[in-house]
Amino acid sequence: FENSGNWIFRRRGWLPVFMVIAGIIMMYLGNRQAIIFDLRDEMIFLSLSLLGEVIRIVTVGFAARNTSGRNTAAGQIADELNVTGLYSIVRHPLYAGNFLMWLGPVLFLRSAWFTVVFCLAYWLYYERIMFAEEQFLRRKFGDEYDKWSEKVSAFFPFSFHFIKPKLRFSLRSVLSREYNSFMNIFLIFTVLDFCRNYFLAEKLFFTKVWIYSLASAAVIWIILRSIHKYTKWFEVKER
């Protein structure tokens, strides 16, 4: 179980790709009238994804160096155990944020059964990743980890004994780590919009709100990517 979790972790980017492909196929084969453009509904779906990004931002912004998802293909990394901030509410706030980020595009498809399939797939996929991470933390931090995990649930917040983060919020740390996730939200919605429009009208076009949103996100991405690549401004001590 732990070995499979480590294997899946190194390929964790596969799930959103598979879900997008499955979603496009579902739109083509399913009830196309259900996916007609509705600005209110689609802004709700986008807001849900952005809420997931906010959870990631708050988690990353207060996290210390070599923690909070900074594992590599070579293995797990954890210089210290995160137990404050959102980690005092759930043990895996990044994955809770990811769930909401991906739930938005899934709801875009307006399919109850596809939403259920996504939730089950996400749980099975990340259950193994979380298990592998927790086994690593248990071996490294021992009783400290056990005491924390006994009080804090893994994914759903069943208690709210919030502990103030030890470090100040680092905007530069957030910008350096989250610009890809932010861009991907708008990219996925726009791809789904493009496919939806083609299936409904048999014409290749984007809905204005989505292509304008993607263009705005792309400008932000290019700026942050350039700063990250050509300067050291994002380098922050202890982050």
Image: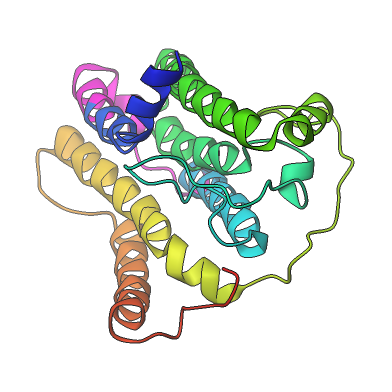
**Residue at horizontal 47%, vertical 15%?**
120
Image spot of residue 52 (x, y percent): 56, 46
Considering the image in quadrants, where does the N terminus appear?
top left
Quick check: 143 left or right of 42?
A: right
Q: Residue furthest left?
A: 203
Asked whether the viewer can see residue 61, the reply is: yes
Asked whether the viewer can see residue 109, the reply is: no
Q: Is residue 134 above or below residue 83?
A: above
**Residue at horizontal 36%, vertical 59%?**
180
Q: Looking at this view, is 101 or 209 the one in front?
A: 101
**Residue at horizontal 30%, vertical 53%?**
187
Q: Which span is picked out in magenta? A: 22-40
Q: How many marks?
A: 0
Image spot of residue 178 (x, y percent): 45, 61
Q: Looking at this view, is 204 or 64 the one in front?
A: 64
- Majority secondary structure of magenta residues: helix
Considering the image in quadrants, where does the C terminus appear?
bottom right
Q: Residue furthest right?
A: 161
Q: Is residue 92 above or below residue 59?
A: above
